[in-house]
Image: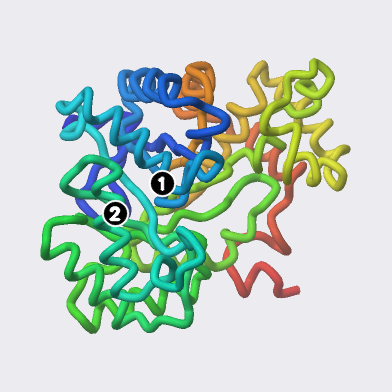
Amino acid sequence: MTHSPLHTRLGRTGLQISKLAFGTVNFGGRLDEAGAHRLLDHAVAQGVTFLDTANTYGWRVHKGHAEEVIGSWLATRPSRREDIVLATKVGDPMDDSPYRQGLSVRNIVSACEASLRRLGTEWIDLYQIHHVDRAVGWDEIWQAMELLVAQGKIRYTGSSNFAGWDIARAQEAARQRHFLGLASEQCVYNLVTRHAELEVIPAAQAYGLGVLVWSPLHGGLLSGILRKLRENTAVKSGQGRALQALEHHRETIEAYEKLCADLGRDPAEVGMAWALSRPGVSGLVIGPRTPAHVDGALAALHEPLHQDALDRLDALFPPIGRGGPAPDAWLS
């Protein structure tokens, strides 16, 4: 693969990924199968070749639906499989059974095989632990992942929603087993929620993990929510945590949208461009519903913010404490 501004290596690995990952959390309910296929075609044609899903996504229809949609897309476009990086997740409950949740060897292996069937593929490029399971030891988790790597069912492992010390424990246990361990950490990180700067991102950088940012717009709060509410066009941003957060951040969001207007940029582009500018960040997981959402994310990537704009955003959304990693961030 030729190098381009759209692609980067995932942490210390040799795996090339697009800096934008197509997240599939909207498959089912917000995006039907035919619409999802068209959107995948558009994104891949624009160079967004990193697809991120989870075995529980699509729950508005049924858990596993998002993987099935990707599988049906690949079935009619088999040549695409060689041109994409496919990531999914394991660990969250698929149902009430104690055998279809958590990070036991039994569940990791059986969940991987079920994901492969739904996805209609022979391998998963990045198999991510959806949430840490501190009831299970890392020797057991790595035993399962080593088996799947040896069988050719997965290529790399990743984490999601880990604390910094979880990353450290995972990597030290992997090192003792002479195993690569985690290739990436997927964490929530945006202008409003900057906690990852304290320990998660520094830990990822120290161990050579790529950082994949989910919710770079805080559920739509940073996507122009006030304008959308005025125009009655808010979809995701008009509900859930974005609307709840607006109650506490309205003045700041008003100033943010004014700043974006001064820059002549869409608020969603600005929020994503800020996240892409941050040290240690490999890429963003976006959850598009329309081709315009994909194109806006590409504009954020190809048109980075100038330092003056970054400084003004820091003034509006200051880092925690004195900024930077812990413990200096909170030392007075």
From the top left corner, tell me how far across and down residue 250 is, in percent. Answer: 86, 38
Which of the 4 image quadrants contains residue 12?
bottom left
Neighbourhood count class around disc 1 (C-alpha, 10 Å): few under 14, some 14–19, many 20 upward: many
Which of the 4 image quadrants contains residue 80?
top left
Q: Residue at x 53, y 25 (%)?
A: 289
From the top left corner, tell me how far across and down residue 283 is, in percent. Answer: 42, 42
Q: Amino acid at mark 2?
A: Ala
The answer to whether the residues at label 1 and label 2 have Cβ atoms under 8 Å apart is yes
Seen in the picture, residue 278 relative to 209 is either above or below; the reply is above
From the top left corner, tell me how far across and down residue 324 is, in percent. Answer: 60, 61
**174 or 152, which lies in front?**
152
Q: Which residue is mark 2?
A: 114
Q: Which residue is mark 1?
A: 64
- Judge left or right: residue 129 versus residue 117: right
Q: CA distance from mark 1 to mark 2?
A: 9 Å
Sequence-first tag of 1 and 2? 1
- Judge left or right: residue 91 versus residue 74: right
**114 or 310, which lies in front?**
114
Quadrant of the drawing holding the N terminus? top left
